[in-house]
Image: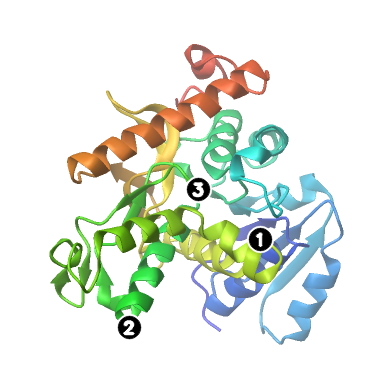
């Protein structure tokens, strides 16, 4: 098998359903011949299954020792937080998972400060990614969060509605926070070459149905819990590995990612923007939609800021004015 790189990829939370699926996906994509599975619970069983799958010339290690896991790592994907349960929102996980993110960032700074890219997918991802970035000392474009899952939920909902392939839905995007306050942008969407804005409000797609679809998209994670009895694991696993593949210099990532944003309007926050992912990291521009969509993005930003400020109150992060003392890149 030809690999994209021979540099070390560490999967954090590898003993869990998301982590173990990430390991298999990374091996099936041929990302690297050096993959390390790390978890506080032994991931050796996952490693042994991967070896027994016959993945050829690959070094697969498993450890519960953070120093061993992070030493020489050049890429990291972390699902190492508590999952959502029925009735919970992503925000319900804020304090506990952000403490985990703080420790993760500190471990990155201590054991692998030369890491090239880190993808954070445990919720609330915008805040856990922000905390990881702060304490890791990395540059903003080197830490990204899973936001593409919201866009694929919108894309799949439209594809089912109009009975077309998902690739026939173009211009699909959700921006802002990964949660129920996300901004769903429909103004750039085309359905097999037809503008969505020309269809909304017709008998084919009444305005009320579009509004309900947007609401359903923002609650897509809760729907998976309802349908499967557990939180999503296959879709976040696959998309996060696609993200790290782009960071390795492979195929470009197709959807928005959460990235650190610092503009006149949106400041010192991690949120989904219009992004590109390459081996040089994430680059973004502020998306422009209808006045209603832009206002929704503003509201999503304000919601994220409130959670960030709550982290200050909880003494998980210092006030924003002091961040540069911890990470000079911010």
Badge 3 marks a residue whose secondary structure is: strand
Q: Which residue is mark 3?
A: 145
Residue 193 placed where, x, y %?
15, 75
Left or right position of 306 against 16 = left
Q: Distance of mark 3 from mark 1, alpha carbons?
A: 17 Å
Other residues around mark 2 within 10 Å, as few (<14) / some (14–19) / many (≥20)? few
Badge 2 marks a residue whose secondary structure is: loop
First in residue order: circle 3 vs circle 1: 3
**Disc 2 vs disc 1: which is toward the camera?**
2
Other residues around mark 3 within 10 Å, as few (<14) / some (14–19) / many (≥20)? many
Find residue 148 and report its image quarter: bottom left
Q: Which residue is mark 1?
A: 231
Residue 164 placed where, x, y %?
30, 82
Front residue of 280 and 321: 321
Q: Which mark is residue 148?
A: none
Other residues around mark 1 within 10 Å, as few (<14) / some (14–19) / many (≥20)? some
Q: Which residue is mark 2?
A: 163
**Disc 3 vs disc 2: which is toward the camera?**
2
């Amino acid at each position: 098998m030809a690999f994209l790189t021979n540099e070390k990829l560490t999967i954090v939370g590898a003993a869990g359903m998301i982590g173990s699926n990430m390991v298999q996906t990374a091996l099936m994509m041929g990302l690297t011949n050096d993959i390390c599975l790390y978890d506080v619970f032994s991931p050796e069983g996952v490693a042994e299954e991967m070896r027994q799958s016959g993945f050829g010339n690959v070094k697969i290690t498993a450890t519960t020792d953070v120093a061993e896991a992070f030493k020489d790592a050049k890429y990291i994907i972390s699902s190492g937080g508590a999952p959502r349960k029925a009735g919970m929102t992503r925000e319900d996980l804020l304090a506990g998972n952000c403490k985990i993110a703080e420790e993760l960032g500190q471990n990155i700074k201590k054991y692998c400060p030369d890491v090239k890219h880190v993808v954070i997918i445990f919720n609330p991802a915008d805040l856990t990614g922000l905390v990881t970035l702060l304490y890791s000392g990395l540059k903003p474009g080197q830490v990204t969060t899973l936001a593409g899952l919201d866009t694929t939920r919108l894309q799949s909902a439209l594809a089912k509605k109009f009975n077309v392939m998902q690739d026939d839905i173009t211009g699909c995007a959700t921006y802002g926070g990964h949660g129920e306050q996300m901004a769903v942008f429909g103004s750039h969407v085309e359905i097999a070459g037809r503008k969505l804005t020309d269809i909304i409000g017709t008998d084919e797609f009444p305005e009320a149905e579009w509004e309900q679809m947007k609401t359903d998209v923002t609650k897509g994670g809760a729907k998976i819990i309802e349908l499967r009895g557990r939180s999503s694991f296959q879709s976040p696993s696959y998309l996060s590995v696609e993200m790290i593949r782009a960071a390795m210099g492979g195929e470009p990532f197709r959807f928005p990612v959460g990235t650190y944003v610092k503009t006149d309007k949106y400041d010192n926050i991690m949120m989904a923007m219009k992004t590109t992912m390459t081996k040089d990291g994430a680059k973004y521009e502020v998306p422009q939609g209808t006045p209603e969509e832009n206002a929704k993005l503003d509201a999503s930003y304000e919601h994220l800021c409130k959670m960030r400020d709550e982290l200050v109150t909880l003494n998980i992060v210092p006030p924003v004015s002091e961040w540069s003392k911890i990470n000079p890149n911010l």
